[in-house]
Image (cartoon, grey):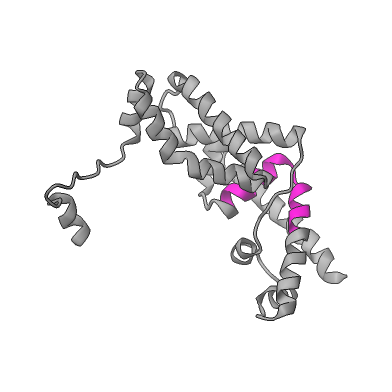
Amino acid sequence: MLETISKKHPAKGVEAMPEWNEKKVVDRAQNGDMEACDELIQQYQERIYSTIYHMISNHEDAADLAQITFIKAIRKINNFKGQSSFFTWLYRIAVNNTINFIRTKRKRVILSINQMDEEFDRGEELLGLVSKETPQRDINRLELQGILNAAMLKLSPNHRLVVTLHDVQGMPHEQIGEIMDCNTNTVRTRLHYARKQLQAHLSDYLKQ
């Protein structure tokens, strides 16, 4: 209620922030408005960088790839026809750049144990291993994190991507399908296969 009031009656001397309208900003950018280009970059740079980083686990490379993504997007912005959201179109550029990078330069990938705790089915052994507040827990989590990162490296770029977008970024299947240019059934199949592969590697670890 307070938020509604503040929007209708901004304080004197305080300029109300305009609501974000992606289509209008994109239209301005397509007409050569560089301020609009800057707005698009500011709106999406953190999410683009975060996705890339979770796929390659290197801050400098992620920053470079994010920059390349926006340069390409701005240069080709008139190719955007509005068949999807601009955000989805931008993600496709970032994803393609990152997959090409992975294929030419393999990097360690981080999927945190916390995210795994939330997203994956866990057996009692694994649950006990990472949930007890003891010094051994920290050692176990570090070791398990290393095993998980190694398992992620063994996935194909597409399977690594679907895990990153769904389990790290929290995207719905439909949006992932738009980004990866496939249907939701393919997304679910890839996600199921990738999780099974990761769980298999973790099971081997627990048996040692």
- Residue 189 appears in the rendering: no
Q: For the point 57% across and 39% down, which residue is it?
A: 183
- In the rendered image, residue 42, in percent from the top left (x then y), is placed at 42, 38
Identity of the residue furthest to the right in this view: 208
> Is 151 part of what is drawn in magenta?
yes
Q: How many marks?
A: 0
Frontmost residue, 167 versus 75? 75
The quadrant in which residue 44 appears is: top left
Identity of the residue furthest to the front in this view: 13
Quadrant (top left, top right, bottom left, bottom right) of the N terminus: bottom left
- Residue 87 appears in the rendering: yes
What span is in magenta? 148-166
Q: Is residue 39 left or right of residue 154?
A: left
Q: For the point 50% across and 44% down, which residue is it?
A: 47
Q: Is residue 68 left or right of residue 85?
A: right
Quadrant (top left, top right, bottom left, bottom right) of the C terminus: bottom right
Frontmost residue, 203 versus 137? 137
Q: For the point 18% across and 51% down, which residue is it?
A: 7
Frontmost residue, 53 versus 207? 53
- In the rendered image, residue 161, in percent from the top left (x then y), is placed at 64, 44
The quadrant in which residue 128 appears is: bottom right
- In the rendered image, residue 151, in percent from the top left (x then y), is placed at 77, 54
Frontmost residue, 14 versus 154? 14
Q: Is residue 20 above or below residue 120?
A: above
- In the rendered image, residue 33, in percent from the top left (x then y), is placed at 34, 22
Q: Is residue 38 left or right of residue 170?
A: left
Magenta stretch mostly in which secondary structure? helix
Q: For the point 24% across and 44% down, which residue is it?
A: 17
